[in-house]
């Protein structure tokens, strides 16, 4: 449980205070679905007319809330998002569908809106029925507690094995108007996003149609949350939702490639990349944050696949945890990726120190500065395939015994 884990040594020194976004109200409450003496349900309420986009897990055993979101995203309209922690409502059969139906109905009735404009996400243990009556019972408290400055409380309420809430914010210009993007997410283990992340929610006051918002979110996700991994496992519940309230008074937007959106795209990318990095920094048992830069690959997709092969390698991750400069494990991981690689062109550096060139270790290689680098909390690995122009950056963490401790007792 979130309350029992010491904060990650990689946690930011301070938690950002997110600015208000007019009309977005966030509330939190304690339902007792699993956790005791802590908030475990979050409700975000947005103005009528708000648009929504989403990116969801590709898992073939996805949760009932994911099915519900997928069914309703095409409409592009939203009034509320309800999220519970401690129970994933995945692999729960028809009972899981009913839990979503009743939970969203309770919210819709309280707000006087259509049920298909209430989105839901759940995280926690798989295979245990979700007691929706406990969620329904706290709906009045959720609505009453809604505040425009409730970002931190909402982010904390959806944590499971997370050791700190994860929030980010940016501002951007659309024409002459300044708009805000706020985002928060949860995730610590079972992190290998497949077109999404664990549970993430972003909000903006920009006025953007649903289809355009969807394209912007998919593009931003591809270079951020799809480039982070903790343990190689994709969740049944991965959900990322982006809401645009439309409160900002700027020129109408009809296409995702409208030049007026250039700065908005920059800000959205920055929010998503910051959140992705926070996922790796809070990886279960993590003691080191690892950045893997891949260049010279046959394509950008190949570069990301190679980066993830290195990032997901237990041998690479345990070597980093043990502060062992075993660069041969990186060579192994590049080779297993299945992407094009040429032994004689492959260059590997750690902490800016070149290790390989011309198909072998560089002459007079001195391991000492590499060891010093790996002993730090932030480890940087650079890989150059030397065969193309494809590039990608991937973020991960080390693999320690703490990961076993947390996951060996997750249900107890």
Image: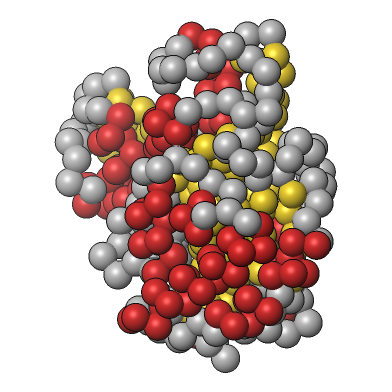
Q: State the residue at coordinates (69%, 8%).
A: 176
Q: Which is nearer the eye, 364 or 410?
A: 410
Q: Which is nearer the eye, 350 or 222?
A: 222
Vertical placement of 180 versus 172: above or below?
below
Name the spot of residue 275 as percent of width and height, x first: 59, 45
Vertical placement of 13 versus 129: above or below?
above
Name the spot of residue 313 as percent of width and height, x first: 36, 58
Q: Which is nearer the eye, 129 or 237?
A: 129
Q: Which is nearer the eye, 285 or 251?
A: 251
Q: How many marks?
A: 0
Q: Quadrant of the C terminus?
A: bottom right
Name the spot of residue 16 as percent of width and height, x first: 79, 44
Name the spot of residue 408 as percent of width and height, x first: 50, 85
Q: Quadrant of the N terminus?
A: bottom right
Q: Residue furthest bottom?
A: 412
In which quarter of the view is residue 145 placed?
bottom right
**Left or right relative to 247: residue 380:** left
Q: Report if residue 10 is visible in the image.
A: no
Q: State the residue at coordinates (70%, 14%).
A: 177
Q: State the residue at coordinates (73%, 40%).
A: 23
**Left or right relative to 120: residue 58:** left
Q: State the residue at coordinates (45%, 33%).
A: 210
Q: Report if residue 112 is visible in the image.
A: yes
**Left or right relative to 150: residue 139:** left
Vertical placement of 182 versus 133: above or below?
above
């Amino acid at each position: 449980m979130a309350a029992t884990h010491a904060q990650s040594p990689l946690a930011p020194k301070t938690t950002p205070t997110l600015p208000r976004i007019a009309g977005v109200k966030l509330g939190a409450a304690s339902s007792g679905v699993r956790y005791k003496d802590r908030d475990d349900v979050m409700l975000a309420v947005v103005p009528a007319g708000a648009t929504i986009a989403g990116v969801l897990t590709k898992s073939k055993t996805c949760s009932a809330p994911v099915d519900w979101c997928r069914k309703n995203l095409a409409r592009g309209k939203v009034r509320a998002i309800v999220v519970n922690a401690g129970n994933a409502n995945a692999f729960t059969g028809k009972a899981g569908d009913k839990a979503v139906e009743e939970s969203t109905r309770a919210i819709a009735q309280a707000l006087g809106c259509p049920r298909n404009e209430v989105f839901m996400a759940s995280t926690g243990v798989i295979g245990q029925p979700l007691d929706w009556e406990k969620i329904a019972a706290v709906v009045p408290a959720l609505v009453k507690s809604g505040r425009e400055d409730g970002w931190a409380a909402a982010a904390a309420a959806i944590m499971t094995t997370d050791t700190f809430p994860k929030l980010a914010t940016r501002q951007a210009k659309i024409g002459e108007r300044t708009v805000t993007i706020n985002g928060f997410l949860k995730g610590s283990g079972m992190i290998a996003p497949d077109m999404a992340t664990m549970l993430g929610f972003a909000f903006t006051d920009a006025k953007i149609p649903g289809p355009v918002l969807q394209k912007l979110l998919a593009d931003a996700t591809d270079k951020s949350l799809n480039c982070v991994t903790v343990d190689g496992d994709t969740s049944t519940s991965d959900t990322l939702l982006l809401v645009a309230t439309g409160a900002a008074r700027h020129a109408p937007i009809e296409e995702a490639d409208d030049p007026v959106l250039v700065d908005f795209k920059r800000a959205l990318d920055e929010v998503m990349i910051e959140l992705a990095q926070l996922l790796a920094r809070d990886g279960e048992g993590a003691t080191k944050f690892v950045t893997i830069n891949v260049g010279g690959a046959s394509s950008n997709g190949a570069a990301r696949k190679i980066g993830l092969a290195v990032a997901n390698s237990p041998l690479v991750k345990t070597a980093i945890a043990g502060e062992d400069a075993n660069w041969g494990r990186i060579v192994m991981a590049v080779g297993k990726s299945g992407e094009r690689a040429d032994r004689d062109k492959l260059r590997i550096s750690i902490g800016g120190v070149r290790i390989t060139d011309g198909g072998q270790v560089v002459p007079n290689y001195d391991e000492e500065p590499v060891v010093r680098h790996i002993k730090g909390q932030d480890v940087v690995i650079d890989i150059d395939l030397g065969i193309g122009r494809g590039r990608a950056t991937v973020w991960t963490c080390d693999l320690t015994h703490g990961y076993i401790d947390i996951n060996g007792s997750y249900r107890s």
